[in-house]
Image: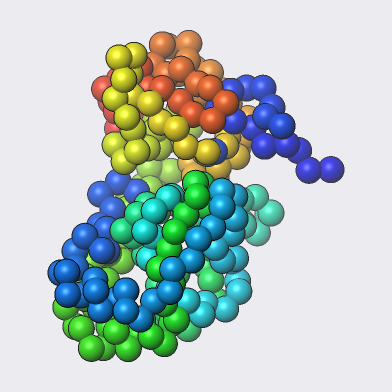
Amino acid sequence: MQRPARGWEDRPTVAEPGELRFLDALSREQVEALRAIGRVRRYPVGARLFNEREPGDAVLVLQSGRVKLSAVTDGGREALLGIREPGELIGEMSAIDAAPRSATATALEPVEVLALSSQAFSAYLERTPGVALVLVRVLNRRLRDADRKRTEFLAQDTVGRVCSRLVELADRFGEAGDDGTHIDLSITQEDLAGWTGSSREAVIRALRTLRELGWIATRRRGVTLLEVEMLRRRAV
């Protein structure tokens, strides 16, 4: 029987820094040319935009909402690979190498995308080499981020890795409040465990430790960072 997902709290519930946004790096003319060959699609919260291992027949440009990318390990665990936000590309790797999807994309919020067929996207890159260079920079930035996370897995304990991800979420999605930095994102403890290469039990203990230190306050579908700088130091 599948266990219910858990939120940030210890009780059951019945949730890349420096990411280069593809659209932001394009000129107005390049964006208009891209929109002319795409079709708008909308997805509700929890919908899968595409699934791991299926053929990659489309490239998606996020226009609104946020999406998580995840993959299933050989042991059957879901590992969160990253979170994409408006302006970013999803599914471009399959368009480039014609291989199946390497991850599943799930809407964390209501999402609107501009969908382009893989063939149309490839032809667009051939017609606009400047955009192809932007794509290279996007992929290079993601590769550097993946290398950094692999280094963290070797050098940090679970608490340090959890602090790293919380700081990343705060830097990318946090909203400042009188009592700290609020992160309202539907990421579960299982997501956080997969993202940090830890077990759910280890993540539960790490969150409890951070609460006891007074650095965070958790709730069912979010967290408030009360001491961002302390978390940032612990993440080093």
Q: Quadrant of the N terminus?
A: top right
Left/right of residue 3 with respect to residue 232 in the rendered view: right
Furthest-right residue in this view: 1
Decide: is 7 above or below 229.
Answer: below
Residue at the (45%, 25%) spot, across then down: 223
Which is more toward the observer, 64 or 101? 64
How many numbered marks appear?
0
Q: What scheme was used to colour the molecule? A: rainbow
Q: Position of residue 117 (x, y in %)?
A: 45, 81
Q: Nearer the viewer, residue 171 or 158?
A: 171
Q: What percent of the width, then of the height, locates residue 224?
A: 41, 22
Is 120 located above or below residue 27 in the figure?
below
Can you see residue 63? yes
Q: Is residue 77 left or right of residue 232?
A: right
Q: Quadrant of the C terminus?
A: top left
Q: Position of residue 52 (x, y in %)?
A: 59, 66
In the image, 232 versus 120, the foreground residue is 120
Visible residue check, residue 164: no
Seen at 39% across and 76% down, the residue is: 38
Spot occupied by residue 207 in the image (x, y as percentages of width and height): 51, 23
> Toward which corner of the image does residue 55 lie, by quadrant?
bottom right
**Residue at image point 65% right, 50% down:** 77
